[in-house]
Image: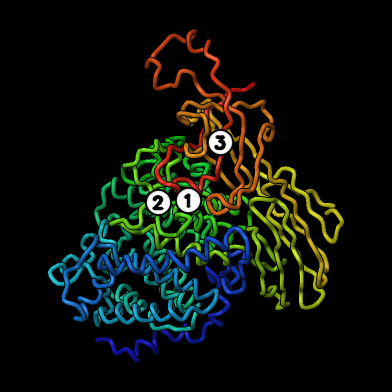
Amino acid sequence: MFPRTIFALLVLAPLLTAQDWRDAGVLDLRKSPHARLHSVPVRAVTIEDGFWSKRRQVNVERSIPSLLALLEENGVVDNFRRLSGRKNVARRGPLYTDSDLYKWMEAVAFVLQSGDNPKLRAQFDQLTDEILAAQEPSGYLNTYFVEDRVPLRFQQMQSGHELYCLGHLLQAAIAYHRATGNRRLLDGALRFVEYLIRDFGPDKKPLLTGHPELELALVELYRTTGDRRHLDLAGYLLRGDGERLKLSRRDVVYLFSGKPFIERTKLEGHAVRTMYAASGATDYFIETGDEAYRRTLDRLWQDMTHGKMYITGGVGSRAQGEAFGEPYELPNRLAYTESCAAIGNMIWNWRLLAATGEARFADEIERALYNGVNSGMSLDGTLYCYRNPLELTGDPEDKIRNPWYSTTCCPPNLQRVLASLPGYFYSTSREGLHIHLYDDNTLDWRLEDGTGLRLKQTTKYPWEGTVEISMRPERAAEFTLFLRVPAWASSARAAVNGRPVRDPVKAGEYLAIRRKWQPNDRVVLDLGITPRLTSANPLVRENAGRVAVERGPLVYCMEQADQFGVTSIFDVKLSHGGERAKGFTGEYRPDKLGGIVELWHTGVAEEPPLTERPLYEALRDVRGRAGKPVTISFIPYYAFSNRGPSAMQVWIPYEQR
């Protein structure tokens, strides 16, 4: 056995001399040579009484506690206790259940980065005891490949999830270290990494991430420890070792690993694996500057956003293989769009934003966050969507929201996003401060020249488009304030201290305001939020003759529960005159679905209902039917199925008046 004292001296020494752990963000980019933007710590941002504060409160008070109870009830924690001899029970659950506990712990760690919570901290420390008690002297740690399965270790890498579990262990341990300074779990995770470095690599035994995740965790570990071997191991995994492993083409496609990442020309295979692989590759580029990675990442991003991403930011259109389909293959009712895949889309774009500073990536972060991610957790925080389709029939047997899944990857993943959310609002650069997201919050941080800065956003975003920003640098200081103007905000305006900004305010870019900022300077950004109708590329055949309703960053949907005088939402067409905001009325409803802006628009209901008509009939007979006028109600997509099973659709047939 490698003595732990020697291990600590040789391996953890770089960690001991690292910069203050309190200053690290969701990504620690302070020393990353190819990061255009640098993360702000979660603890530096306080989200106040706005849109996200309710979701985050529910996350801490209901979602996180109830999921731990379910993890206990379903034997996930006992899987560790049985190995340490603390419980004599059989192993339960799929082979990747360790990762679900680690993700839950990462969520707790991010909660603690926003402020101490003694109960959650004690639970984390107790779970750390349970986990490390199960770790083998070699450093290996996994509750499935033990006892009679020991000979199978790293023999089933396509499906074994050993490295996937390790990746989530590392992320939980790093997040907790940044929350508390406590390295105990991180020390244990590092021992497993040492096990890998000792036995696997180009000149040793081959290694494969059957489910990419370890790549991005290793790069973040490198940022934490400064140990180049961690970055090199990530690079080895991204290059792939498929020839030695004799992988099939199906393996290489489905796993999105096993061959050099830079040879990828399109997004394919399992959507979550693909998003995590792309995230790890972006992290690797940020540290190395390898241009082949940059070109590949841009090619894959274009492939996704031009033909393989839903309007909600969800990805993965096929249930078979939870996979990407062909370009424009974006079915609504059959959409798989796993919550974890939307999260993967969000975290990939976060890394691309850090690498480039380009607003197009922040736009996709917002799209995924407000829609495809936010839909994944019920408003009360106890039910979760694995899939997030864009159409439902209302079949009561189709239980789209559930408290537990045998594969329970999505619930803790959603929890860690909400817990870490303050870390996504701002970044710093040599030029100044970048604001990516809008909500009531206060930033208490500093510019990169060391100047202290306190900034407060006051807004009712996304329900209203006005954002007031109070600037309070510790002294008068010249720097640039970069305000993201979303691509949909074509009528946006800005003013400083009541005077309009002279530079053009361009949608889809950052508005750069450079001046010598004084304490109490005031910026007002008006994004002009109004409803708009969105059409899909005609190659998305399922959406031909249909439109989606959007307002600000939110996608809206029709749900049967809100329609009066309408037998079926699938009988309805929206009537519009071509103007994007004409015909809509809206009202903030504080008592509905946690508080929403509900929209209404005129429409026409088929008469007789479509279910009473022939399967096929002459076109001349169809054209002769007028239908009856109705009023259509729309709610934000993220709130669907919070009142029980109900028919729902995002893409609505329309007729132009």
Kind of residue at badge 2: Cys
Farthest bottom residue in view: 5
Task: Give percent across and percent down for residue 416.
Answer: 46, 65
Q: Which residue is mark 1?
A: 375
Q: CA distance from mark 2 to mark 3?
A: 21 Å
First reached walking from the N terminus: tag 2 or tag 3: 2
Kind of residue at badge 3: Ala
The quarter of the image holding the C terminus is top right
Q: Which residue is mark 3?
A: 548
First reached walking from the N terminus: tag 1 or tag 2: 1
The quarter of the image holding the N terminus is bottom left
Quarter occupied by residue 66: bottom left
First reached walking from the N terminus: tag 1 or tag 3: 1
Q: Secondary structure at mark 1?
A: helix
Q: Residues within 10 Å of mark 3 (few under 14, many from 20)?
A: many
* Image: 529 above or below 289: above
Q: Residues within 10 Å of mark 1 (few under 14, many from 20)?
A: many
Q: Residues within 10 Å of mark 2 (few under 14, many from 20)?
A: many
Residue 61 falls left or right of residue 2: right
Kind of residue at badge 1: Ser
The residue closer to the viewer here, 15 or 395, is 395
Task: Give percent across and percent down for residue 88.
Answer: 16, 76
CB-based contact (under 8 Å), mark 1 and mark 2 = yes
Q: Which residue is mark 2?
A: 385
Residue at coordinates 36% horizontally, 41% vertically from top-left?
Answer: 318
Task: Give percent across and percent down for residue 31.
Answer: 57, 73
| Residue 606 appears in view | yes
